Image: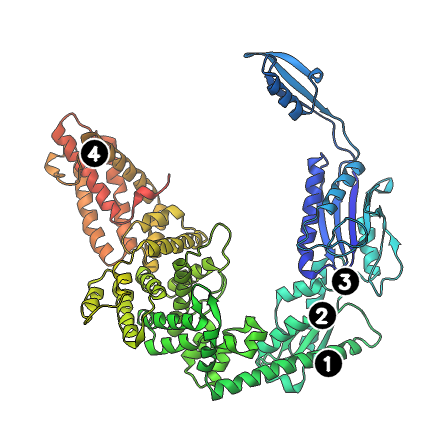
Amino acid sequence: MPDLLIELFSEEIPARMQTRAAEDLKKLVTDGLVEAGLTYAGAAAFSTPRRLTLTVQGLLAASPATREERRGPKTDAPEKAIEGFLRGAGVTREQCEEREDKKGRVLFAIIEKPGRPAAEIIAEVLEKTVRNFPWPKSMRWGAGSLRWVRPLHSLICLLTDEQGAEVVPLEIDGIVAGKTTRGHRFMGGEAFDVTSFDDYEAKLKRAKVVLSPAERADTIWHDATNRAFAAGLEVVDDRGLLTEVSGLVEWPVVLMGEIGEDFLQLPPEVLQTSMKEHQKFFSVKNPSSRRIERFVTVANVETADDGATILAGNQKVLSARLSDAKFFWENDLRVAKSEGLTAWTDRLGNVTFHNKMGSQKARIERIAALAREIAPMVGADAALAEQAATVAKADLSSEMVYEFPELQGLMGRYYAEAAGLPAEVAAACQEHYSPLGPSDDVPTAPVSVAVALADKLDTLTGFWAIDEKPTGSKDPFALRRAALGVIRLVLNNGLRLHLDRLIDAQLLRHKINPEGKHEEALRDAVLREIAHHGVFGSAVRAVIDQIEGDAPEWIAEVEQHSGDLSDDLLAFIHDRLKVHLRDEGIRHDVIDACLAMPNRDDLALLVTRATALSETLATEDGGNLVQGFKRANNILTQAEEKDGVEYSFGADPKFAESDEEKALFAALDKAEAEIAPAMESEDFAAAMAAMAALRGPIDAFFEAVQVNSDNQVVRRNRLNLLSRIRQICLQVADLTRLEG
């Protein structure tokens, strides 16, 4: 069984595209081979800056011949139906057989395909793959029509078996397949021929090319950490940069250089970001001082002076880059100390956040107002939360963040500290963006939590207010991430919040534009009551009733506010909660059963209830109780529809005829006495344990008792007894929403 070697040799492929391109090459070629009948034992793809390589082991020498019988229409079917069948099967009428069937004489197409040599199939599949390769960006060169990410120079397509190596006959836009390749651009010497994948890999290494990206990455990391260790330092771990750098070199040569003394006082994050973004350097820190003191660069060539010339050039360029960073840092510090962060915030009045939501400054004012309302709910000082929200985004106007947007928040913390702001405010400047993803840390400091929640809720309510919601896979404003951030902030900090009230208040804040300070004060008073008591609360009505003279026009926005928009946003948050809890093993129908209960906007309460229900259902009693409940509910529902009445009261133990029926009355009394106080104290585990204890009495009742007795008094009593089962169980969760 032959092995296949493919190499596509070109000019340098961008590092960010190499891994995906190798995967695409493997998938497109192997899928095409299998579809044509060529199975294989194994395959592996590799990439370097100048080549994509695929090896396929254990290929069939030829595709097997096949014979397929395809049943068609009856012989007397309409002519168009027969023609369509023949066209689809690729046969003529003469190639079909007529056979007797239970429905009459039927046409059967006999489709025979002879086997084909592997080389013929490989040539077709590879040409199709190359011509239709899914590069994110591609180019044409010369007079040909072929598109590739960079000009394609040569092509290896080699089949190897016990008899030797055979070049697959193939030409693509003037590029003829062969068995010749080249090594390193500068150190590889002349072109050379290969006979198999093992021969190819070994000769490449002698020609100063490491084929495997993983091997190049391991070499870089090993050499970098060893050099740092020898100097008593540590390399800052950055797997993303390691992957990128390993795609920039074919023969990694690790060098370590020093950072100029003038730049060592810059924040380590500034040094790290500048070196990573501009030079692709690894940062090397002092473990005792935590300062970034050196850098590691990876060259693609060995030099006679062991890289001294390369390092000198790198250090010269790095000094120029870090001089810019030093200027930004010192200039920003001067502004922060002399003018304060509010000077930057004022400038954000000229920066549009969204054309339908105004400027960044207007957004900051909304976030600050909401943060003040949230603060007492999360144990934060209201004044500190408002102050933190006011300056949290000030660094967006700084020169450093303009140059390095990824440092937003972090630089805000440095500048807040330099301006002499409280430590809680400085921390909130950095932490209010978090969590940015499912693995990101969640803030726990109360002021940071208040500002982070306000920031994310303002984003969600703002885009809901202008009807810019996520659709399908499209989420250009990262609203799903914002919703997950709200969920994680609430759950990780155990917060008890009525989200619908906060959502209503912020939706109205987006809609209401008061005129003058008096109206602003009135608006804030109204929205404060909404955030704490709900939009339809009596406290809000009391504030409105105290207005002297004509009420502002925007009061109508409050009085006519519909809950539909806030309900829709809350449902969106609940959908993200289902995804979040699914990873923790809680089924979506369990959450649905708990969402039907009161206070569904209290996420911490909702999750506590769902967790208790999930644990109960995992027990034998819990799972069987649900079946008993559904049986009782089905019988009761059918009887109520048939009789046109509701059986919801009047079950009397004096009409019980059997011991099992009497035992169920007693069990329900006991469960009700235990569930009611447990629910009131939010001890859901105890409530569900009491509910699960009903499993035995309910099962015994159904085994011993016929509910629809001929005696109508007994029948009605038993139906009312089933109603008690339903009422008691539904106190805990809506079990009707559980699947199965």
The residue identified by callout 4 is 640
Q: Nearer the viewer, residue 161 or 327?
A: 327
Residue 495: image x %, image y %?
A: 34, 65
Select label 2 or label 1 by which is in front. 1
Secondary element under disc 4, as helix, strand or loop, is: helix
Secondary element under disc 2, as helix, strand or loop, is: helix
Q: Is residue 12 visible?
A: yes
Name which of mark 2 and mark 3 comes first in the sequence.
Answer: 2
- Residue 698 placement, left or right of 71: left
The Cα atoms of the two marked residues, 4 and 1, are separated by 87 Å
Residue 253: image x %, image y %?
A: 76, 69
The residue identified by callout 3 is 250
Select label 2 or label 3 by which is in front. 3
Residue 316: numbered disc: 1
Amino acid marked by disc 1: Lys
From the viewer's perspective, is residue 416 above or below residue 218?
Answer: below
Secondary element under disc 1, as helix, strand or loop, is: helix
The Cα atoms of the two marked residues, 1 and 3, are separated by 25 Å
Residue 223: numbered disc: 2
Residue 426: image x %, image y %?
A: 45, 79
Secondary element under disc 3, as helix, strand or loop, is: loop
Residue farthest to the left, as pictured:
654
The answer to which image quadrant residue 374 occupies is bottom left
Q: Are marks 1 and 3 in contact (CB under 8 Å)?
A: no
Amino acid marked by disc 2: Asp
Residue at image location 18% in from the left, 30% down from the top: 643
The answer to which image quadrant residue 203 occupies is bottom right
Badge 4: few (under 14), some or many (20 or more) residues near its Cα, within 10 Å? some
Amino acid marked by disc 3: Glu
Q: Nearer the viewer, residue 442 or 24?
A: 24
